[in-house]
Image (cartoon, rainbow, N blue to C red):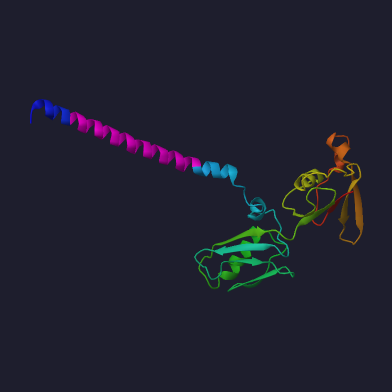
Amino acid sequence: MTNQKRFRNLGLAAIAGCLFSTGLLAQTTNGNVGNSAGPEIASKTTPAPAESSAMNLHDDTYVIGASDVLAINVWKEPEVSRSIPVRSDGRISLPLAGEIQAAGQTPLKLETEIANKLKSFLSDPEVTVIVQQINSQKFNILGQVARPGSYPLTNATTVLDALALAGGFRDFAKQKSIYVLRHNADGTEVRMPFNYKSVIKAKNSTENITLQPKDTIVVP
């Protein structure tokens, strides 16, 4: 083989190697962009579950009530761990731990009580309690709103917050004649007026009360 042919073959091989390397680099770059962009796009376009912020409660402020669904996890003990609703009497039943009063307790306090009951059977049980579904604390909104119904009351929710959750007013809503019905512990009922027009103009902000469980907002 002459020197001229040898150099020409080496040159072709070098060009082919460069093209191959460039192709690999493009594939790698495209793959990385796809992988990094995918989750970001998904996070923007995929709506979070409606109950995610309300249901994953694990703190010392929320008070568990009847009909709430609890996710109870005991580390390395799948037979004991489970998702369980709080009965109408406020109690739950767990293997080994038996009957436990859940209603009226916070998740953190219930964790401690369950762990104490399991100590007779397990060594240093680690218990986590999360409120998976809130059914005990709700408010109602009725009348001329886009989405009337019952809504979970998971934090400080005002009348304005509730109206927003319900999608706002329908066309013929009487925005000056809204009221909140509240049932007191002694069986009496209180009717509290709410003038939307005044509240949004900051003329009567005291009417924008914080709702309590079982409150009913009526939009005529």
Q: Quadrant of residue 110?
A: bottom right
Residue most extreme to the top:
4
Residue drawn at x 78%, y 50% as measured from the top left: 147
Q: Give the residues drawn in magenta, as a range.
A: 10-37
- Report the residue at 85% width, 48% height from top: 144
Looking at the image, the residue that sits furthest to the left is 1
User: Up-down: is 90 above or below 130?
Assistant: below
Q: x, y percentage for residue 114? A: 61, 66
Decide whether residue 127 is among the magenta residues: no
Q: In front here: 31 or 99?
A: 31
- Residue 22 belongs to magenta span: yes
Left or right of residue 27: residue 102: right
Residue sitting nearer the eye, 92 or 4: 4
Magenta stretch secondary structure, dominant: helix
- Does residue 45 appear left or right of residue 22 in this picture? right
Q: Position of residue 209 (x, y in %)?
A: 83, 45
Q: Residue at x 8, y 28 (%)?
A: 2
Whether 170 is drawn above or below 22: the answer is: below
**Residue 120 vs residue 142: left or right?**
left
Label tally = 0
167 left or right, relative to 127: right
- Residue 91 place in picture, x, y as percent: 70, 69
Q: Quadrant of the N terminus?
A: top left
